[in-house]
Amino acid sequence: MGEVDQQATKKPAKASQGFSAEEKAAMRQRAKEQKASADRAEGERDLLEKIAAMQPSDRAMAERLHAIIKDNAPSLTPKTWYGMPAYANQDGKIVCFFQPAEKFKTRYATFGFNDSAHLDDGNFWPVAYALKELTAADEAQITALVKQAVS
């Protein structure tokens, strides 16, 4: 029995590495955001500051997405969410967000929707899209998705 007890108390050979530096930074940013005011102007100011600090390719897409969302879903409130540009409904729930490629060192940016978006289409539908650049056709599709998300 002593041998069994010793094995049960041993630490695993390989411990978890925990959260990455990027994930920790995102969590700190989220805590800061939750303490901030729910003021629409303040939220948009924070969002625009985050966009301005992005690398040029991410910044161009984020600026264009911001314009599309403001024009086509004015009911959404701009804010940051884990340090990313995001847009919330009247209940404060994030409807859509932009994750720059640089945030987690990925090869593409992501435009995504949370479950508060009205995109349901049967039992299976996409909620995130990889972006390397935005074409006119991409912008038209995003515009349609944003309109549907807030319908």
Image (cartoon, rainbow, N blue to C red):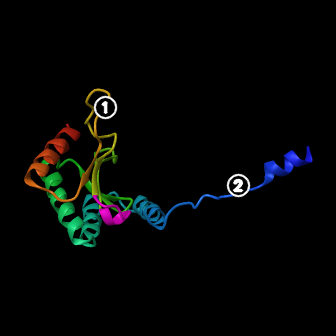
Q: Which kind of residue does numbered mark 2 sit on? A: Pro
Is 74 positioned to the left or the right of 85 in the image? left
Residue 114 is situated, as x and y percent measured from the top left of the image, at 33, 44
- Contact between marks 2 and 1 (CB within 8 A): the answer is no
Rendered residue at 34%/40% (across/down): 115
Q: What element does badge 2 sit on?
A: loop
Say how many tags the image has: 2
Rendered residue at 31%/62% (across/down): 101
Q: Which kind of residue does numbered mark 1 sit on? A: Phe
Rendered residue at 36%/61% (across/down): 37
Q: Is residue 85 above or below residue 55?
A: above
Is 43 positioned to the left or the right of 24 in the image? left
Q: Quadrant of the C terminus?
A: top left
Q: What element does badge 1 sit on?
A: loop
Q: From where the camera sits, is residue 106 visible?
A: yes
Main secondary structure of the magenta stretch: loop
Residue 124 is situated, as x and y percent measured from the top left of the image, at 31, 31
Identify residue for label 2. 12
Q: Quadrant of the N terminus?
A: top right
Q: Which mark is residue 124?
A: 1
- Residue at far left of view: 136
Spatial separation of the CA atoms under disc 2 and disc 1: 39 Å
Q: Nearer the viewer, residue 74 or 148?
A: 148
Q: Residues within 10 Å of mark 2 (few under 14, many from 20)?
A: few
Q: Is residue 107 magenta?
A: yes
Residue 116 is situated, as x and y percent measured from the top left of the image, at 32, 40
Q: Is residue 42 magenta?
A: no
| Magenta segment boundaries in residue numbering | 101-108
**Location of residue 22 (image quadrant):** bottom left
Q: From where the camera sits, is residue 150 visible?
A: no
